[in-house]
Image (cartoon, rainbow, N blue to C red):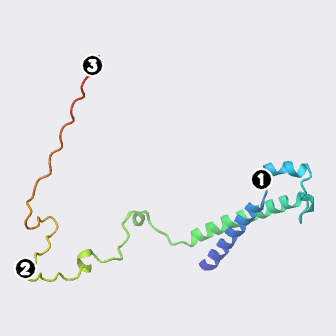
């Protein structure tokens, strides 16, 4: 039933878009009054406007009814579920990483996070310096 509603919803959306794009704007009425040739159209001089307006109204009402129907078919979710982090489908990095091979003799092992590599010294970061006061402008 949900798939039928979705298919109908998408088709009504497309029809609504096409019908709205087929309508002429309010500024186009001046061309009709000056004889711009719209009297030779399929619906007549004013027939297309009325037909497209009624079709737009019907499509908009059907669109809203289908949107509310699809919202009612959706599964209920509590606010706590919305705020909670979704379960991760990936395994933690420690489980995904292959077992580290022992380095061969003469090779250095890579440092652990937070560990200082061999041959380097741990140097503390310099403290931020105080800003220099601005010099007064000389007259």
Q: Position of residue 56 (x, y in %)?
A: 75, 62
> Does 134 appear above or below 39?
above
Q: Position of residue 112 (x, y in %)?
A: 14, 70
Q: Residue pushed farthest top?
A: 139
Judged from the image, the secondary structure of the residue bearing numbered disc 2 is: loop
Tell me the residue at 92%/52% (across/down): 35
Looking at the image, which residue is at 90% across and 49% down? 33
Q: Position of residue 80 (x, y in %)?
A: 40, 64
Q: Residue furthest front?
A: 139
* Circle nearer the N terminus (2, 1): 1
Q: Which mark is residue 106?
A: 2
Instruction: Judge depth for marks 2 and 1 and give the one in front.
Output: 2
Q: Quadrant of the C terminus?
A: top left
- Residue occupying the point 38% across, 70% down: 86
Real-space Cα separation, disc 2 to disc 1, in angstroms = 80 Å
State the image coordinates of residue 62 (x, y, percent, origin top left).
Answer: 70, 67
Task: Tell me the residue that label 1 is attached to.
Answer: 25
Query: Can see residue 66?
Result: yes
Please indicate whether residue 88 sits to the left or right of residue 134 in the image.
right
User: Tag 2 or tag 3, which sits nearer the N-term?
Assistant: 2
């Amino acid at each position: 039933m949900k798939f039928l509603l979705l298919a109908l919803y998408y088709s009504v959306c497309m029809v609504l878009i096409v019908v709205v794009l087929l309508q002429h704007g309010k500024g186009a009425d001046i061309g009709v009054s000056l004889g711009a040739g719209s009297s030779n159209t399929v619906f007549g001089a004013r027939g297309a406007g009325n037909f497209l307006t009624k079709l737009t109204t019907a499509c908009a009402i059907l669109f809203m009814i289908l949107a509310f129907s699809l919202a009612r078919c959706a599964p209920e979710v509590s606010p706590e579920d919305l705020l909670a982090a979704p379960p991760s489908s990936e395994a933690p990095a420690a489980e995904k990483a292959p077992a580290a091979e022992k380095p061969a003799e003469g090779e250095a092992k890579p440092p652990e996070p937070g560990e200082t590599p061999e041959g380097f010294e741990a140097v503390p970061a310099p403290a931020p310096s105080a800003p220099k006061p601005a010099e007064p402008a000389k007259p």
